[in-house]
Image (cartoon, rainbow, N blue to C red):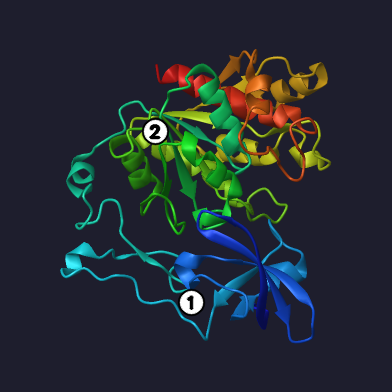
């Protein structure tokens, strides 16, 4: 359960949209690296006493290696501004029934300026949507889209399989200038728009953000047990179904690697095969980049053969994609491996983006 710690802020470190990194000194003199979300707990300053949830850090779990600030007990932030009419206040509760549940304005709530548009929206009118099971694919997919369509409006749909606050992602912060906006869906929060489901999030991306292409992926720090079904990224298959239900064009970004040390993730990861082969009931375009090493290409073809009855396997040329990936404004990293260490993974994601850009024309 929760491993509590209390201490004093001794230094502020990096800061990005919605998050502040800090050093906290505990009573025994040890120092912990912590992360605060000012929108939830207020803005910490040196000398503040803080309460921390240190469980993931102490156990060596997850992405980032932080204790998380739960409260500044001696300097609580003020209540958010209240509008005169209660209809103007948001009623969307996320991270529900946890101590830090935020109450937000849903993009399709009655008080939202977008309510009328979204209440009338029936579909996404052929919108290409790239689905990926790791947050690390986001900048690579975006690079692939903008390699061929630099002016394309791209929205990011943040699902709730990984980090719930959009603010946790430094990559997302670095990509904001290239995105039309972020829609946080389900229990996720902190995007430019808040939606209840993947379906309403897709409608918001199309009809509010006017997206030409959407990238749908969980936040950093996915949850997995090493089994076929015990993995948060299995929800990629459900996202394919949602896109198809709303008249969109699902594009599957496959998790391809010849560098992952775990056999179940070499070739096409078993997570991609489960999500697209077992969970996705609607057809999608599954993108395979040209130019993979021969042995890896053979493994990929063999793994995807059983999926070809439902999905369309699409070969996409990769000329120019390496340069686009190297020009990414944020570092590329998956499971601690950079572009050169796991080139096939990032190339596959960029190829999926290139294919989506072609569908958007």
Q: Nearer the viewer, residue 87 or 7?
A: 7
> In which quadrant of the rendered view does residue 31 lie?
bottom right
Q: Is residue 281 visible?
A: no
How many numbered marks appear? Answer: 2
Task: Determine whether 353 is above or below 201 in the image.
Answer: above
The x, y position of residue 172, in whole percent, is 54, 45
Any mark on residue 351, and which? none
User: Which image quadrant is residue 13 in?
Assistant: bottom right
Classify residue 162 by image quadrant: bottom right
Task: Give left or right: position of 348 versus 102.
Answer: right
Reading the image, the residue beneath label 2 is 244
Label 1 crowd (10 A; few <14 / some 14-19 / many >=20): few
Q: Is residue 76 above or below residue 155?
A: below
Q: Indicate which disc, 2 or 1, sits on the residue closer to the N terminus.
A: 1
2 vs 1, front mark: 1
The C terminus - image quarter? top left
Disc 1, SS = loop
Identify the element where label 2 is drawn: helix
Identity of the residue drawn at 73% across and 27% down: 344
Name the one closer to the observer, 267 or 120: 120
- Residue nearest the observer in this picture, 113 or 19: 19
Which residue position is annotated with label 1? 99
Q: Is residue 122 visible?
A: yes
Q: Position of residue 276 (x, y in %)?
A: 56, 35
**Between 287 and 176, the one nearer to me in the picture:** 176
Marks 2/1: CA–CA distance: 36 Å
Say if 264 sits above or below 128 in the image: below
On the image, the x and y values in percent for residue 16 come to: 56, 54
Name the residue rendered at 67%, 20% in the picture: 323
């Amino acid at each position: 359960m929760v491993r509590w710690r209390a201490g004093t802020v001794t230094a502020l470190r990096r800061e990005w949209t919605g998050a502040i990194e800090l050093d906290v000194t505990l009573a025994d003199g040890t120092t912990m690296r912590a992360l605060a979300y000012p929108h939830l707990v207020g803005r910490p300053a040196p000398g503040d006493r803080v309460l921390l949830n240190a469980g993931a850090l102490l156990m060596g779990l997850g992405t980032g290696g932080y204790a998380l600030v739960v409260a500044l007990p001696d300097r609580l932030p003020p209540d958010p501004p209240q509008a005169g009419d209660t209809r103007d206040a948001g009623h969307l509760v996320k991270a529900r029934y946890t101590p830090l549940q935020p109450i937000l304005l849903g993009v399709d709530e009655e008080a939202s300026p977008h309510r009328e548009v979204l209440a009338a929206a029936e579909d996404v009118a052929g919108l290409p949507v790239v689905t990926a099971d790791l947050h690390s694919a986001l900048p690579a997919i975006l690079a692939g889209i903008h390699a061929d369509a630099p002016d394309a409006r791209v929205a990011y749909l943040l699902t709730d399989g990984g980090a719930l606050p959009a603010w946790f992602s430094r990559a997302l912060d670095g990509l904001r200038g290239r995105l039309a906006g972020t829609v946080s869906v389900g229990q996720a929060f902190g995007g430019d728009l808040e939606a209840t489901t993947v379906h309403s999030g897709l409608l918001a991306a199309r009809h509010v953000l006017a997206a030409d292409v959407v990238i749908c992926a969980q936040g950093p720090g996915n949850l997995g047990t090493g089994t076929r079904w015990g993995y948060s990224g299995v929800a990629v298959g459900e996202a394919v179904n949602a896109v198809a239900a709303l008249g969109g064009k699902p594009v599957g970004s496959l998790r391809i690697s010849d560098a992952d040390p775990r056999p179940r993730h070499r070739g096409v990861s078993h997570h991609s095969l489960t999500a697209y082969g077992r969970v996705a009931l609607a057809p999608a375009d599954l993108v395979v980049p040209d130019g993979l090493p021969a042995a890896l290409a053979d493994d990929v073809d063999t793994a995807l053969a059983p999926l070809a009855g439902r999905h369309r396997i699409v070969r996409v040329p990769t000329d120019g994609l390496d340069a686009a990936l190297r020009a990414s404004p944020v570092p590329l990293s998956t499971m601690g491996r950079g572009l050169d260490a796991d080139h096939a993974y990032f190339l596959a994601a960029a190829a999926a983006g290139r294919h989506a850009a072609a569908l958007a024309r």
